[in-house]
Image (tube, grey):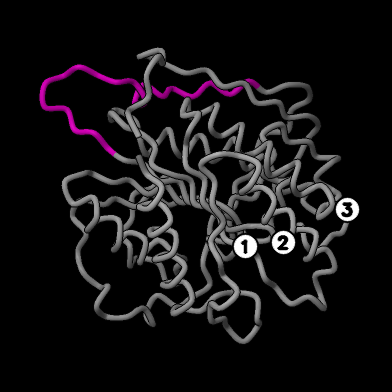
């Protein structure tokens, strides 16, 4: 992947529509009340970091975006991660909710630790940025680029959005002042949609729309998009088969997209969230998928 070309070197204006009023929930650890406005909110993100830059000696960064819901957010105990992974990764920075943090600073983790371990070694001559923004219990309706409160009610997410706008803002924060190119999006999400049959039936169309939009907004039309197939308990997720079939089809409909198998990953007692061993395997599989597909 080459650095983004053809961008305004000073700013990129992204217009995001938000109708009605809503309370925005970023995460369990961080809840932010948003202003209640009517009409269209225009969000202007200063993303000069995405320009090529010409300064001598300027460092290139490879950026990976990690998004989704609770299995990307991570419910595994960080303390249970294999000790062999507990080392410094000097060429890799993790940004969580817009802040730079250590890979082992949080009590719980997702696939970022083993992904960083694999990628930092494979790209040892590169600087790497991981931008992680995942919110538990969120459907694709909450992540819709053109978020709509009324439509989000289908999955009980009328107070969860607009998450896509938040994601773009956090990417902007992490990459400000840097010359970057985007390596891949890692996505682990779909359980919430599987819980509501009407949302599950629309999953494929919503997922295709999300992939196309993030590529357009990041000005990277061939951006790799890697995602795990969801597998929560069928007894309490009546739309599961629709979501899983949609995920199977999507990788065959768009280039540079790959689904990562998760059916054999170990889980916590709730049979919904991956445990530490499962998350480590998931991160490795994301890394393997990226390394086999990158140009």
- SS for tag 2? helix
- Image quadrant occupied by the C terminus: top left
Report whether 209 appears left or right of 175.
right
The residue lying furthest to the left in this view is 57
N-terminal of the two: label 1 or label 2?
A: 1
Instruction: Please name whichever residue, 283 or 288, is drawn nearer the observer in this view of the structure.
Output: 288
> In the image, is residue 213 part of the stretch drawn in magenta?
no
Q: Please identify the dominant SS of the magenta region.
A: loop
Mark 1 and mark 2 residues within 8 Å of each other at the beta carbon: yes
Relative image position of residue 294 (x, y in whole percent): 37, 44
Magenta range is: 42-61
Q: Nearer the viewer, mark 3 or mark 2?
A: 2
Relative image position of residue 243 (x, y in whole percent): 75, 58
Give residue 229's mark.
1
Can residue 73 be seen? yes
User: Image point 41% across, 47% down: which residue?
Assistant: 293
Name the residue carrying label 3. 198
N-terminal of the two: label 3 or label 2?
A: 3
N-terminal of the two: label 3 or label 1?
A: 3
User: Image point 43% across, 72% down: which residue?
Assistant: 281
Instruction: Please name whichever residue, 82 or 149, is drawn nearer the observer in this view of the structure.
Output: 82
């Amino acid at each position: 992947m080459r650095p983004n070309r053809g961008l305004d070197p000073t700013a990129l204006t992204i217009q995001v529509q938000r109708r009605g009023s809503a309370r925005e929930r970023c995460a369990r650890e961080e809840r932010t009340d948003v202003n209640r406005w009517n009409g269209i909110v225009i969000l202007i993100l200063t993303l000069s970091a995405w320009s090529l830059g010409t300064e001598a000696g300027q460092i290139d960064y490879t950026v990976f975006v990690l998004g989704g819901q609770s299995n990307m957010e991570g419910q595994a105990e960080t303390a249970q991660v294999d000790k062999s992974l507990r080392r410094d990764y000097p060429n890799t920075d993790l940004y969580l909710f817009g802040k730079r943090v250590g890979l082992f600073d949080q009590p719980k983790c997702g696939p970022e630790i083993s992904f960083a371990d694999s990628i930092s070694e494979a790209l040892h001559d590169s600087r790497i940025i991981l931008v992680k923004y995942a919110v538990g219990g969120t459907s694709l309706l909450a992540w819709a680029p053109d978020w709509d409160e009324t439509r989000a009610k289908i999955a009980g997410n009328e107070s969860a959005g607009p998450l896509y706008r938040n994601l773009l803002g956090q990417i902007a924060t992490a990459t400000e002042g840097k010359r970057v190119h985007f390596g891949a999006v890692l996505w682990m999400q779909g359980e919430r949609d599987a819980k509501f049959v009407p949302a599950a039936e629309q999953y494929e169309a919503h997922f295709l729309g999300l992939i196309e939009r993030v590529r357009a907004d990041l000005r990277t039309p061939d951006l790799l998009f890697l995602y795990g197939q969801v597998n929560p308990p069928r007894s309490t997720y009546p739309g599961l088969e629709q979501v899983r079939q949609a995920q199977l089809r999507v990788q065959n409909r768009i280039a540079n997209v790959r689904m990562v198998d998760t059916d054999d990953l170990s889980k916590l007692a709730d049979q919904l969230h991956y445990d530490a061993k499962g998350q480590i395997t998931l991160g490795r599989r994301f890394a393997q998928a990226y390394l086999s597909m990158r140009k």
